[in-house]
Amino acid sequence: MGTIKMVAACVAALGVAGCGNFGQIANDVAPLVSAEAVSNPRDYTVADINVVVPETLTVSEAHSYFPRADIVWREDPPGDRREQIAAVLQTAAERGTEGFAGAREVALNIEVVMFHALTERARYSVGGVHDIDLLMSVTDAATGAVIEPPREINAALRGYGGARAVEANLSGDVPKVRLTEHLAGVFQAELMGPVGGAGFTP
């Protein structure tokens, strides 16, 4: 497929699935389980959260539907996009794990592989997908011993487009708020599965 045809195909498909492999795409933000209801068979208390955004990841400020870069973020004023998305992930991880009160203190380690939120052009026209890929691991907070080795997490969330995006902005449901809540739910779910689940090492 020629370059022009490929770009056109991606733009046409943005409202459905973007241009890439997004795995499971959440259509809406799942509510966090209340602290009182948290059931954590891993018996963790998250004592430390480490977010890494590698300098090797590319950043784009292009005003296009789908910039070719690892990091696309427009929900903060112009600045260090790596710092900005690290702050979003830090806040989300804190919210997602604040109800844990287990016997074992652990560190939650998050590395960004891709953080590709919608551009203004996509959001106010066809919409699309906030494509977020992460590596997550769990280590002992005191010794640094690996408890859960790094595993890939796809945290894709469908983004609003057109009139729906405008309505959401007016109500305060902006992408930064929505993504933070979504990621908090993702981190909580990843640490609440049964012992012996994916990525778990006793």
Image (cartoon, grey):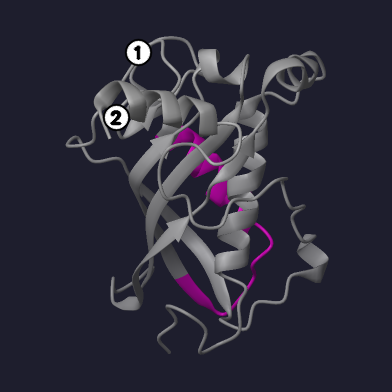
Residue 91, horizontal then vertical, whole percent:
55, 40
The label number, if any, that marks residue 120 in the structure image: none
Q: Amino acid at mark 1?
A: Ala
Q: Residue 164 appears in which quarter of the rendering?
A: top right
Contact between marks 2 and 1 (CB within 8 A): the answer is yes
Majority SS type along the magenta span: helix
Give whichever of 141, 53 is nearer the camera: 53
Q: Residue 58 appears in which quarter of the rendering?
A: top left
The label number, if any, that marks residue 69 in the structure image: 2
Q: Return the disc, 2 or 1, that comes first in the chain's sequence.
A: 1
Q: Residue 8 appears in which quarter of the rendering?
A: top left
Residue 59 in sight? no
Cα separation between marks 2 and 1? 9 Å
Residue 7 in sight? yes
Q: Residue at x 62, y 27 (%)?
A: 175
Q: Residue at x 42, y 78 (%)?
A: 199
Q: Is residue 29 above or below residue 86?
A: below
Q: Is residue 108 above or below residue 94?
A: below
Quadrant of the drawing holding the N terminus: top left
Q: Amino acid at mark 2?
A: Ala
Q: Element at badge 2?
A: loop
Query: Is residue 103 one of those drawn in magenta?
Result: yes
Residue that mark 1 sits on: 62
Q: Is residue 41 left or right of residue 3?
A: right
Query: Is residue 152 one of those drawn in magenta?
Result: no
